[in-house]
Amino acid sequence: MVSDKHGLKDRVAGTFRELKGKATNDKTEEMVGKLRKAKGKIKDKTRDLKDDLDKKEKEA
């Protein structure tokens, strides 16, 4: 698990934009928010994978 979440900012901003889109009935804004949240999750997963590979490399 990553100690410093690299995608946290994107996930928070995405959640905000998604909720803003729902509140204003703006489907485009809602979709942009969902995509931004997904981007944040991808950043976190990529970082976790990189950290795991680095750890295994050090063990070998």
Image (cartoon, rainbow, N blue to C red):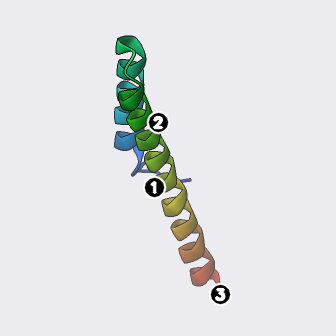
Q: How many marks?
A: 3
Where is residue 38 shown, x and y percent of the image? 49, 45
Mark 2 or 1 closer to N-term? Answer: 2
Res 34 label: 2
Res 23 label: none
Residue ID at (39%, 52%): 6
- For the C terminus, the quadrant is bottom right
Asked if marks 3 and 2 touch (Cβ < 8 Å), the reply is no
Residues packed near mark 1 inside 10 Å, few (<14), some (14 to 19) or many (20 plus): some
Looking at the picture, tell me which residue is in the foreground, 16 or 31: 31
Res 43 label: 1
Mark 3 or 2 closer to N-term? Answer: 2
Dot 2 lies on which element?
helix
Residue type, mark 1 in image: Lys
Residue ID at (35%, 29%): 29
Residues packed near mark 2 inside 10 Å, few (<14), some (14 to 19) or many (20 plus): some
Q: Quadrant of residue 36?
A: top left
Residue type, mark 3 in image: Ala
- For this view, does 56 lie left or right of residue 23? right
Between disc 1 and disc 3, the foreground one is 1
Res 60 label: 3
Residue ID at (38%, 31%): 28
Mark 1 or 3 closer to N-term? Answer: 1
